[in-house]
Image (cartoon, grey):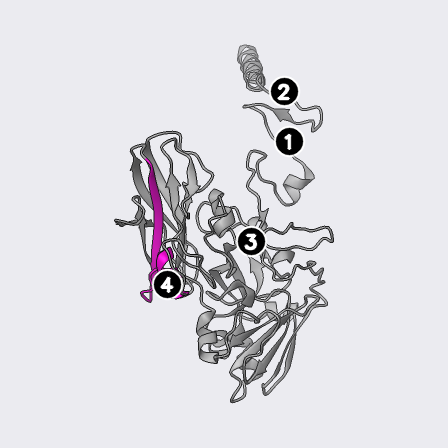
Amino acid sequence: MGSKKSDRREFLKQGAALAGGMTLGAATNSATGQLEGPEAFIQGTDELVGYGKRSRFVTSERIAHGGRPSPDTFGLDFHIAAPLQDSVGVITPSSLHYIGTTRGAYVPDIDPDKHRLMIHGMVDRPLVFTMEELKRLPSVTRLHFIECAGNRANRRHTTVQETHGMTSCAEWTGVLLSTLLEEAGVQEGGDWLVVEGVEEVKGASSIPMTKAMDDCLLCYGMNGEAVRPQQGFPLRLVAPGFEGIFNTKWVRRIKVVDQYYMTYNDFGHLTQDPVNAALGYQIGPKSVITCPSGGQQLPGPGFYEVSGLAWSGGGAVSRVEVSTDGGQTWMDADIRGTAQRMAHTRFSFNWEWDGSECELQSRCTDEIGQLQPSRAQAGEFFNQSGSQPRVRGQDNSIQPWRIESDGSVHNAIA
């Protein structure tokens, strides 16, 4: 018995020595008190336990977009672009979701216990909801993208974050807007809504009743947690497939009206024709290669997986094609997973690069047959000329990336 105990003690001593040897390559950082090196361990902290923290080796971050700093000297947030070049899958982390604003804004600090949503106007029963009451109603969870209409290819931009970073895709949880409107009882002739947020300028947008009753959501959840303050906490509208500006944040009031109103948000987005105005909201179809993309470097000839994102306000993406010769020939890409309606869809294409200069492009087709146009086709639509016209309005044209023989990747828009 004594011999067995002695052997066991010796085994434990050897095990402890081995475990100690595994940290021989690690050094202690005098500033953080944590081990560093290839075999270091992360010590537990309140931050890690309380909410979680990404690896210090992951550096993806959002950037100011559109030539204006964010925040500015007054603390106002402007356009902030998501790092699409680092994205995997289709969901954008809440902390990296893009932010869009037409005027710059302070983020409202709203106590959810005091927040109220009012529905009034052309309804039989004006209603006021607390957040608790909204959360007691039947909920839905859906994957949807949101995109700023200014998200576009531009010859001055060098990376995909600069060209297309004003779009993101998240899992949204909330109440169908139709549930609330049915409870309020929409009166005959109530064909439009004005949805108002708690912004200082009372940001509001006009939404057709047909869209509101179809698939609009009032969301309090995002990616499995509460909507972030920059995304509209405690309640925001998600109008799937519509321009980002119509997805009102910090929603406090919805008024049913008999016509569309040229609100601050609507100016420049609505036309004077109500029919064209309703159709003009829709985004896409659109796609962009995120890897390889501008600013990245291929180490040399060989196999690469070309990967990117496709999306459309017209429904689910049904097909994605990739060209490696500047759009002369097209080959089908693989759609990863199941394409969801009005959501980012990940695509990939197996490519053997021979080391010569070439141009990569992607284009998508949605479930209603809409095909993403070339830049020349988009320019023709907007009455612009040339092979690389300056496209005005909502731009869903193809983004080309040029691969140089040294492996560097550049924006191929002249």
Determine crowd level at label 2: few under 14, some 14-19, many 20+ residues with C-alpha closer than 10 A.
some
Is residue 363 one of those drawn in magenta?
A: yes
Determine crowd level at label 1: few under 14, some 14-19, many 20+ residues with C-alpha closer than 10 A.
few
Residue 24, label in figure: none
Q: Residue at the location (43% across, 34% down)?
A: 297
Q: Which residue is mark 4?
A: 380
Amino acid at circle 2? Ala
Q: Nearer the viewer, mark 2 or mark 3?
A: 3
Q: Which residue is mark 2?
A: 27
Q: Earlier in the sequence, mark 1 or mark 3?
A: 1
Q: Earlier in the sequence, mark 4 or mark 2?
A: 2
Q: Secondary structure at mark 3?
A: loop
Q: Which residue is mark 1?
A: 43
The residue lying toward the viewer, choosing from 217 and 44, is: 217
Relative image position of residue 126 (x, y in whole percent): 63, 83
Relative image position of residue 56 (x, y in whole percent): 59, 34
Amino acid at circle 3? Tyr
Residue 116 visible in the shown view: yes
- The stretch in magenta equals 357-382
